[in-house]
Image: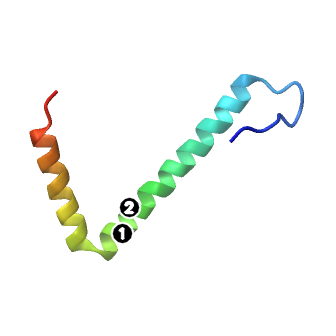
Amino acid sequence: MLRAPRNPHETDAETDAERRRRRAQFLRDLAEARELRDRVQPRRAKVARLRHAMRMRTFRW
């Protein structure tokens, strides 16, 4: 999403910091949603963990 700077003297560092803040918030929300899903559906979470472990064991570097 591109947006015009609110003030013409806004620097790239400020917009980068803002982007990093939004990204950090998004990642926190995503982790919270995953934890909630795992609590609500423990069997599905266990199966997903096992599948992920199998993928990681068979992955070739």
Separation of residues labelled 2 and 1 (CA atoms): 5 Å
Q: Is residue 31 left or right of residue 42?
A: right
Extreme residue toward the right, this view: 8
Quarter occupied by residue 5 = top right
**Image quarter in which the N terminus is found:** top right
Name the element at disc 2: helix
Q: From the viewer's side, name the closer residue of 35 and 49.
A: 49
For mark 2, what is the residue?
A: 34
The three-letter amino acid code for the residue at tag 1 is Arg
Establish if 58 lies above or below 29: above
10 Å crowding of disc 1: few (<14), some (14-19), many (20+): few
Q: Residue at x 29, y 74 (%)?
A: 41
Quarter occupied by residue 47 = bottom left
Q: Residue at x 43, y 63 (%)?
A: 33
Marks 2/1 in contact by CB < 8 Å: the verdict is: yes
Q: Residue at x 56, y 43 (%)?
A: 23
Q: Is residue 31 left or right of residue 53?
A: right
Extreme residue toward the bottom, this view: 40
The three-letter amino acid code for the residue at tag 2 is Arg
Residue 36's spot in the image, x, y percent? 39, 68
For mark 1, what is the residue?
A: 37
Q: How many marks?
A: 2
